[in-house]
Amino acid sequence: MENRATDPIGIDVGVPSVTVIAWPILDGNHRVAAAIFRGDLTINAEISGCLDHICELFGLSEAELDEQ
């Protein structure tokens, strides 16, 4: 946990009309666990899938997604 990874966690929320993702973290399970253990306030991530579903899950508006 001393050497933090700089690459983002890979998350795929899927497309609800096509498939349900059982576990959305594609890459970085150990990095997520380490960040939680350290008490990190943020975790760098790349999120893919249906934009509407991303907004719903993370409480974001489409305008906020455009800012990123």
Image: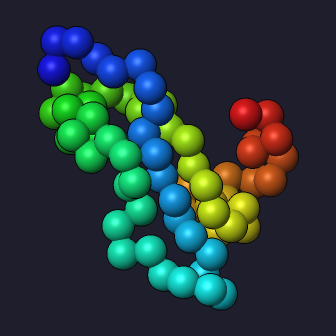
Q: Position of residue 8 (x, y in %)?
A: 46, 32
Image point (44%, 74%), residue name? 21
Image position of 52 (left or right of 19): right
Residue 49 vs 34, above or below: the answer is below
Q: Position of residue 58 (x, y in %)?
A: 56, 55
Residue 63 vs 35, above or below: the answer is below
> Which residue extends farthest top?
2
Image point (44%, 26%), residue name? 7
Q: Position of residue 22 (x, y in %)?
A: 36, 75
Q: Nearer the viewer, residue 39 or 52?
A: 52
In the rendered image, the quadrant that contains the N terminus is: top left
Residue 52 vs 17, above or below: the answer is above
Question: Total number of numbered labels?
Answer: 0
> Which residue extends farthest bottom?
17
Residue 4 vs 41, above or below: the answer is above
In the rendered image, the quadrant that contains the C terminus is: top right
Image point (42%, 62%), residue name? 24
Q: Position of residue 67 (x, y in %)?
A: 79, 34
Residue 16 in sight here: yes
Q: Quadrant of residue 55?
A: bottom right
Residue 59 in sight here: no
What coloring was used for the rendering? Answer: rainbow
Image point (68%, 67%), residue name? 50
